[in-house]
Amino acid sequence: KAGVTQTPRYLIKTRGQQVTLSCSPISGHRSVSWYQQTPGQGLQFLFEYFSETQRNKGNFPGRFSGRQFSNSRSEMNVSTLELGDSALYLCASHRQSTDTQYFGPGTRLTVL
Amino acid sequence: AQRVTQPEKLLSVFKGAPVELKCNYSYSGSPELFWYVQYSRQRLQLLLRHISRESIKGFTADLNKGETSFHLKKPFAQEEDSAMYYCALSAVGAGTASKLTFGTGTRLQVML
């Protein structure tokens, strides 16, 4: 069974730009959760999507948004990028909320 | 609010020595606790979760609700155990089961 895939693996953007990251979950998994990992704050929950609906949200500003498609693939978007948005963005797929989360390799975003 | 504390950033042990990675949590409801591990150049993966009560790769962890702890233990460290270990909590029953709250992680270094 193929694992969670994330594209692109690396991104370099400048302040003020926007970015879209993609996550393809494990086949059969309908939930996708997103996390931000930084040296200072560690791993922090961004949001979860299930069946194309946002089900849970973390404490991030509205510049961070996401969506999920009918095939369970998910995208997250960050608008008006700030230097502090530089991080590793991880997505995790699971069958439903209470199931084990399987993580992707992450997208490393650098904001200059 | 949920909080997970891993007091040690780095734990160095000799091969064959016992290992104990500490994890304390703060949550007023009924938590589910996990240990995730990240080996060098690999993705974050689940090591064990307390409800399954399994022993994975020789590791065990017992949930102590009185002390609000979920320490990870292994009787004899192996070189391949060197990795980053994260303790995580999920608030089951609060409608936010998908939101994992992570500790800051402990790097385990097994010395020969």
Image (tube, coloured by chain):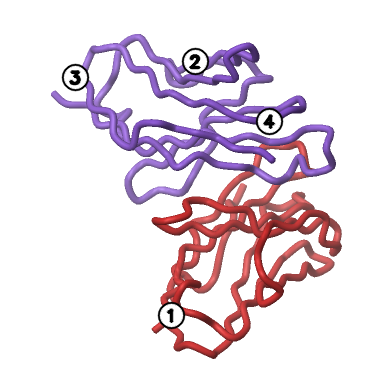
Chain colours: A red, B purple
Question: What residue does disc 3 label?
Answer: B14
- Report the mark closest to the observer, 4 or 1: 4
Which badge, 3 or 4, comes first in the chain's sequence? Answer: 3
Q: Nearer the viewer, residue A34 or B93?
A: B93
Residue B32 got which mark? Answer: none
- Chain under disc 1: A
Question: What residue does disc 4 label?
Answer: B27
Instruction: Please say if B31 is above or below A29.
Output: above
Q: Residues at badges 4 and 1 in contact (C-beta under 8 Å)?
A: no
CA distance for labels 1 and 3: 40 Å
Q: Residues at badges 2 and 3 in contact (C-beta under 8 Å)?
A: no
Q: Position of residue B36 (x, y in %)?
A: 51, 36
Question: What residue does disc 1 label?
Answer: A111
Instruction: Please say if B42 is above or below B49.
Output: below
- Dot 1 alpha-carbon crowd within 10 angstroms: few under 14, some 14 to 19, many 20 or more: some
- Report the mark closest to the observer, 1 or 3: 1
- Chain under disc 4: B
Where disc 1 sits, the SS reads: strand
Q: Does mark 1 fall on the same chain as mark 4?
A: no
Q: Please state the total of marks drawn on the protein image.
A: 4
**Residue occupying image coordinates x 48% and y 45%:** B44
**Residue occupying image coordinates x 62% and y 71%:** A22
